[in-house]
Image (cartoon, rainbow, N blue to C red):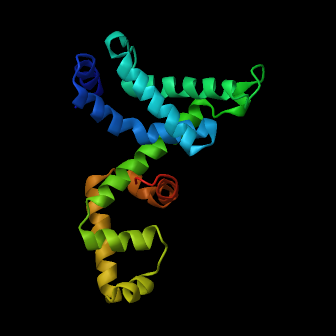
Amino acid sequence: MEDALLVEQFKQGNLKSYEVLYKKYHKVLVLYAKQFVNDLQIAENIVQDTFVTLYEKRDALQIHTSFKSFMYTVVRNNCLNYLKRESKILVNSDISNELPTHEESEHTITKLEMAEKLHRAINQLPQQNQQIFKLSKYRGLTNEEISEKLGLTKRTVETHISNALKKLRATLTMMVIILINFITLIYVLFISNLSYL
């Protein structure tokens, strides 16, 4: 469902629409906020507070851009306000030198969104395809090591990896597949920093 429709339903009191928006944007907004505050728990709190405020002010909500752009802007402003309150940056300092530029932030957001799509696609693979693919791409095990670990032949491992890649290609854009090794780094960061992934 389109974000604009979800927002309209939410403004009319449909809490299910609010939950959908929350689940869709919470994780990437937390990682976005972490760029500014450099602390995962603080980033979580800022995003949580942002969503609470959104809920409390839903009747008066006016969004003139996309919901995604609106939320990134609000979260960024809330991060800046937090940093000023905590005196972690000087109010008179050149903020643009201290924080990611708009272009850098957008680039990071795009990478995170791509990683999120990859994560969902991998979790839709059959169980053994998924397990072998993760051992190969995320843990860096060789086909021989995987075959020893799981008690399979090397040929079976190769077949599972090949099948996993074919299924991912059918689900994702070719750009994501080409960048899969780069996105692996982002995925590892998800695993190490976000316990709910």
Q: Is residue 35 left or right of residue 44?
A: right
Q: Quadrant of residue 148?
A: bottom left
Residue extending furthest top? 60
Q: Is residue 168 left or right of residue 182?
A: left
- Horizontal and vertical percent for residue 83? 66, 29
User: How many discs appear?
Assistant: 0
What residue appears at the point 47 percent right and 36 percent down from the top-left corner? 29
Position of the C terminus, as image quadrant, is: bottom left
Above or below: residue 114 compared with residue 16: below
- Horizontal and vertical percent for residue 31? 51, 42
- Horizontal and vertical percent for residue 162? 31, 72
Can residue 182 be seen here? The reply is: yes
The foreground one among 124 and 106 is 124
Q: Is residue 138 left or right of residue 173?
A: right
What residue appears at the point 36 percent right and 70 percent down from the top-left corner? 133
What residue appears at the point 36 percent right and 13 percent down from the top-left corner? 61
Can residue 2 be seen here? The reply is: no
Q: Quadrant of residue 126?
A: bottom left
What residue appears at the point 35 percent right and 22 percent down from the top-left corner? 55
The foreground one among 178 and 196 is 196
Position of the N terminus, as image quadrant, is: top left
- Horizontal and vertical percent for residue 134? 39, 68
The foreground one among 162 and 183 is 183
Q: Is residue 170 left or right of residue 98?
A: left
